[in-house]
Every structure is written in structure tokens, then in C-alpha cells.
Image: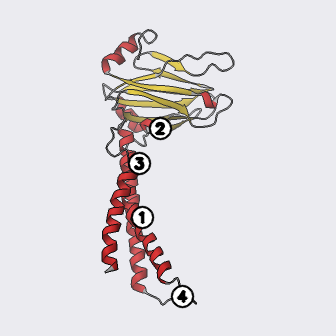
Amino acid sequence: MRGKRLAPALVAAVGFLAAFVDPVAAAQYQSVTEQLIRDLNSMMLAAALPITLLVEGILVYTVWKFRKSDEAKPTKENRRLEITWTVATAVVLLFVGVAAYGVMAQPTVTATQADAQEAMAEDDTVVVDTVGVQWYWKYNYPNENLTVSSGPAVSGVDYGDQPMVVPEDTKLVIRTESEDVIHAFHAPELGLKTDAVPGQTNYLITELTEKGTYTLYCAEFCGQGHSEMLGEIVVVEEDKYEEWVDDPENTSV
């Protein structure tokens, strides 16, 4: 009877915790990359909660039941139990591995040079070469013959304050590299992160689905001006993007 009363309580607790700890479940995602990552996190959470409650429930029950035992008794071998938890563990690990690989293998999460070349072959793809320099970001649009930059005025040098501007709902390829030391391109609100390494090009492929201004910063300690190596990614309508490309200095975004 006690077990029958406990089961509905555990089910209700799982539902409550899942709703409580995943506040972005009904939110609008800012990029297709963020959506894939958030959905994977929610899936893992949904699998982990009942397992956690089951294990902790067994632990609490065992401690309470045997709280007055004077002396521990040796356990007897139970092959059925051992086989059960071995198979259950294998199933959980298989589920986690397959789910994670299914997301990590997506070009919009882990992009290769071949993925980037395929995306850039499409007519409407926007390409931005993002270069990390101590201590600012330089954005080069090869298809638009345009280069802008943004960063703090370190040592009296003004690097400009132009953001990376990209159109909404358009495939975007970001090629990152560095001119000096290792930097890291990180826009957490968009689910984007990759290293910017001297002599090496890394790739990000995504599609930004929500207009707005998002913070970009360097996530790899790179020297004196690291904490000020900030930038912005501004997502606008296609028409506004075209206006900005024509006159980035005089077009407000």
C-alpha cells in the first residue's frame, strides 16, 4: 500500500521539477543552433529526473527502514538484480550517446570546412570572416566587400564600435581566426562558440531567427584587454541589412 501511494507522488514530483527547471521550454529560440542545444538539454533532463528520484527514493527508504539495525548483515548474491541494473545502465548510456551524437553531428552545432563550403555555395548565405585581435573584433563580409570592427579603446587606440550585422532568417556562415593569440568567439544567447586560433580557420553555421542585439565576447583569456573585448551581433530584417551594407557608418541598426 505504501508503494502504491508513493508512485503517484513521484510522478507528480517529476512533472513539477521538469516544468520548474526548464523555463525556456515555451520561449522563442534566437537561433537554430540554440534550439538544438536547448532541446537536447531538455531531453537529458527529462531522462535524468526520474532516475534521480528513483535512486534517492531507494536510498531514503533504505536508511529509514534499517535505521535501528544494530549490526550490518552480509548481503547475498542476486544475479537477477545485478543483470537488471547492468542492462538499465547500458540502456541509459546508449540513449545519452545516441541523443548527444544526433545533435553534435548537426552542421549547425559542429561545423566542418566541408559543411561551410556547402552552405556558402547557396545563393542567399551570408558569410562573415570574424578575426580576433588584441583586443577587438574585426568583421569582414567578403561577398559585400565590407569590413568593420568593434572593441575598447585600449592604449589610446580606437578600434571602432560597429557591430556584426546579419539578416534574420538567413543562413549564416562565420569563419573565425586570430591575428595574434588564441581568442574565443562566444555569443551565449545564440548558442554560438568556437575558438579563434592563429593560422587556423574554424566555422560556425547557423540561422538567426529572432531580431535583436546579442552580446559577443572573447571567452579565452588573451591579455590585458581581455575583459573589454566585447562586441555585438545585431539581427535585423533583410531590408535593413541591405541598407547597412550600403552605408554602415550612417545607418542605425
Residue of label 4: 69
Residue 96 visible within the image: yes
| Towards the viewer: 237 or 3 | 3
Looking at the rendered structure, the secondary structure element under dot 4 is loop
Q: Using a 10 Å C-alpha cutoff, classify the residue at mark 1 as few (fewer than 14 neighbours), some (14 to 19) or many (20 or more).
A: few
Q: Are marks 1 and 4 in contact (CB under 8 Å)?
A: no
Q: Residue at x 50, y 30 (%)?
A: 216
Q: What residue sits right under mark 2 in the picture? A: 188
Of labels 1 and 4, the one closer to you: 4
Amino acid marked by disc 4? Ser
Please say if 137 is above or below 83.
above
Q: Rate crowding at label 4 as few (under 14), some (14 to 19) or many (20 or more) other CA atoms within 10 Å.
A: few
Q: What's the CA distance linking mark 3 and mark 2?
A: 17 Å
Crowding near pointer 3: few (<14 within 10 Å), some, many (20+)?
some
Q: Secondary structure at mark 2?
A: helix
The image shows residue 11, relative to residue 27, as above or below, that is below
CB within 8 Å, label 3 to label 1: no
Drawn side of residue 166 relative to residue 225, left or right: left
Instruction: Tell me where residue 134 sits by quadrant.
Output: top right
Mark before the other along the chain sequence, 3 or 1: 1
Kindly identify the amino acid type of the residue bearing the numbered disc 2: Pro
- Cα gap from disc 2 to disc 1, whole angstroms: 28 Å
Nearer to the camera, 83 or 107: 83
Residue 104, numbered circle: 3
User: Mark 4 vs mark 2: which is more N-terminal?
Assistant: 4
SS at mark 1 in the image: helix
- Relative horizontal placement of residue 29, taking residue 131 as reference (left or right): left
Q: Which residue is mark 1?
A: 93
Q: Earlier in the sequence, mark 1 or mark 4?
A: 4
Please tell me which of labels 3 and 4 falls first in the chain.
4
Q: Position of residue 115 (x, y in %)?
A: 38, 38
Q: Nearer the viewer, mark 3 or mark 2?
A: 2
